[in-house]
Every structure is written in C-alpha cells, then in structure tokens.
Image (spheres, rainbow, N blue to C red):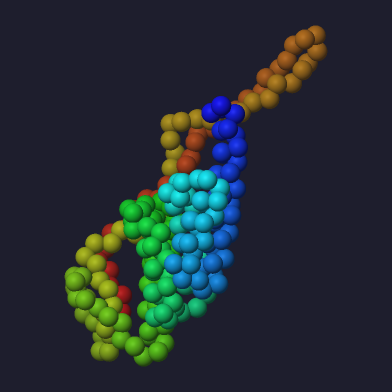
Amino acid sequence: MVSSQAPACVERANDARSELSTLILKGVLDCKPYADLDAEAKGLVTEKALLFDGFRETILEAADGAASQIALRSPVPEAELSRLVDILQGFGVQSYATEFAQRRWYAMAYVGMSHILWQALHDVTPYYDASGRMQFNLHSGELPIVASGKVAFAEERSVSTHERTYGGLSVPVGGGCCYHIGVRRKAKPNELQACNQSIWVKC
C-alpha cells in the first residue's frame, strides 16, 4: 500500500513546489503582506494533504528572488522595507543565516542597501548604532552607516580535485566486436573562496 501511494505523493509534492514558487514570487511582486502570503501558502499545502514545513526552502527561495528583484529595480522606501523583511523573517530566513552565500540568498542585504540609497536620495540620515569598529579618517560631511572589523570578500572559483569523471562510447566494428573510446577528466567544481579580508565601512 505504501509503495503504491508513493509515486502519487511525490507527484503532489512536486506540484506543490512549483505552485508555491509561483504563488510566492507573484505575491511578493504584487505587494502582498506576509499574512496573506502565509495563509495562501498554507492553504495550498493543506489542500494537497502535505506538511508545510517540508516546503519552507522552496518558499524562501521564491521570496528571496522576488525581494531581490524589487530591491535592485529601485530604491526601497520605509514601508516596503518593512513588508519585505516581514516576509523573509516570517518564513524563517534567519534559520539559514549561515548559508546565505552558499544558497545565493542575498535579498536581506539587497533590501537593506536599497533602502539606504532611498534614504540618501530623500535627505534622510541613515541610522548608525556605532557598534562597528571605526578606523577610518572620514572626510568632512561623511557619516558612517555601518562598519565591520573583519570582512571576508569571496569570489567563485573553479577548484581542481583528485576526482575524475569518465565518459565513453562503444562503436561496433563487426563480427560481434566493439571498440570502446573513452576519456577521463579532472572534476573542477565551483566554490566560493575568500580572496581578501579587511576592515570595512559604508558612508
């Protein structure tokens, strides 16, 4: 009974992921608040008789993509900042804080920087809590926004490994014999590697 139901369950789960991704992406871009998106997402999952927690990463992937689009499209005002942060935090993005770079979830950073740009364009002095290290000689009129004592800048690089991949092709040459042609290649996965560490301040 379990094995006969498994394919149907997998199909429902795949359908739910696709529908949730579309629902969240469109909803965030259409300016819906977190409460509405949460209710719609839970309703969709419940309708398919599935567990909501199993789709949290799918939801966050879509929410991050939509929020990033908004932040990169134009400066984010105060109300929009609150809405986007509520959505991301409401769906639990902070649980993945140590994985943002690996997952390429940059929405929280994009939204924050986009809002700072909006403040600068509207003559609003960005809030700075002075918690970061200040080791810079600022010019007249420069105000620090955020500072950090240690920042690692990373870039994606192809890293050679000792693993090899093999591919080949068998060609019939007649008489029931085949000739096999093959090649081995070193695997070169892409990884984020730190290229510089420094003190950082944004004014």
Compared across the picture, whether 121 is left or right of 183 comes to left
**Residue 169 as seen in the image, left or right of residue 126:** right
Q: Position of residue 197 (x, y in %)?
A: 28, 59
Q: Is residue 147 visible?
A: yes
Q: At x 55% / y 51%, what residue is drawn?
A: 47
Judge whether residue 195 can be spotted in this image.
no
What residue sits 39% from the left and 68% below the top?
Answer: 86
Check the image and name the residue furthest to the right.
Answer: 174
- Nearer to us in this view, 199 or 95: 95
Q: Which percent across, then down, holds residue 22?
A: 58, 59
Q: Is residue 14 left or right of residue 181?
A: left
Residue in view at x 54 percent, y 70 percent: 29
State the quadrant of the N terminus.
Answer: top right
In this view, which residue lies farthest toward the top? 175
- Quadrant (top left, top right, bottom left, bottom right) of the C terminus: bottom left
Q: In the depicted view, which residue is nearer to us: 179 or 26?
A: 26
- Residue at image position (30%, 86%) is 125
Number of callouts:
0
- Horizontal and vertical percent position of residue 13: 55, 44
Whether 85 is drawn above or below 184: the answer is below
Residue 123 location (% of width, % of height):
36, 90
- State which quadrant residue 144 falls in: bottom left
